[in-house]
Image (tube, grey):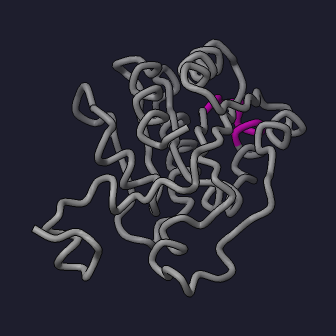
Amino acid sequence: MHPQRLVQEVNDAVPDDAIVCSDAGNSRHWMNHFYQTRRANSYFGSGGLGGVSWSLPATLTAKILFPERPAIGVCGDGGFAMQMHVLLSAIQYKVAPIYVIMNNSLLGMTSQGMGELSTGCEFPDVNFAAIARSCGCFGEQAARPGEVTEAVREALRQDKPAVIDVTIDRKVDMKAAIYSAWAMEAMGGRATR
């Protein structure tokens, strides 16, 4: 699935009062570019690369502070792997944040930034939904259009933390997809006027 489609499905599934937290890396750019907020104080994200995995504790905190509102975090697989222990904290505090993972078994922004010299950015395939279920959470995998929307809606019906592990196409180049031709030219990219 293309990341753009995943963002559209999240947008279609979350209710108007949801708090959505996006992570750093490519997932942040996909969310910032395609997610449509519906009201103030409903979308939060980290700035720069240093915030990888920020959305996990941010989503948990949002759910603790506003238990009546759905809290959904969207992150990459690298970010989720860094702080997946947040699921245990959510179980401990009896709150139900939802995490949607853009899973391409890759540190995408780092890999794209390194270009042909990319090394150490690939991961083995990991089923984060199975890990979530082993912690007592709701876990669902999705890979095809339509599955993300339904999985998020099902997670919203749960009274426990949830992980929606979505396989995305690792070949989709974030910069080529969302940066303007002028931005690509300024960065020394492929696009020209």
Given residues 168 and 98, the one toward you in this image is: 168
Main SS, magenta region, reads loop
Q: Please provide percent x and percent y for residue 119.
A: 65, 83
Q: Quadrant of residue 108?
A: bottom right
From the viewer's perspective, tell me whether residue 44 is left or right of residue 167.
Answer: left
Residue 188: say if magenta.
Answer: no
Q: Please provide percent x and percent y for residue 103.
A: 64, 49
Magenta span of residues: 90-97
Given residues 46 and 145, the one toward you in this image is: 145
From the viewer's perspective, tell me whether residue 30 is left or right of residue 181.
Answer: right
The answer to whether residue 147 is above or below residue 4 is: above
Residue 92: say if magenta.
Answer: yes
- Identify the residue at image location x=57%, y=48%: 169
- Identify the residue at image location x=25%, y=25%: 38
- Identify the residue at image location x=60%, y=38%: 99
Q: Please provide percent x and percent y for residue 83.
A: 68, 58
The answer to whether residue 127 is above or below residue 146 is: below
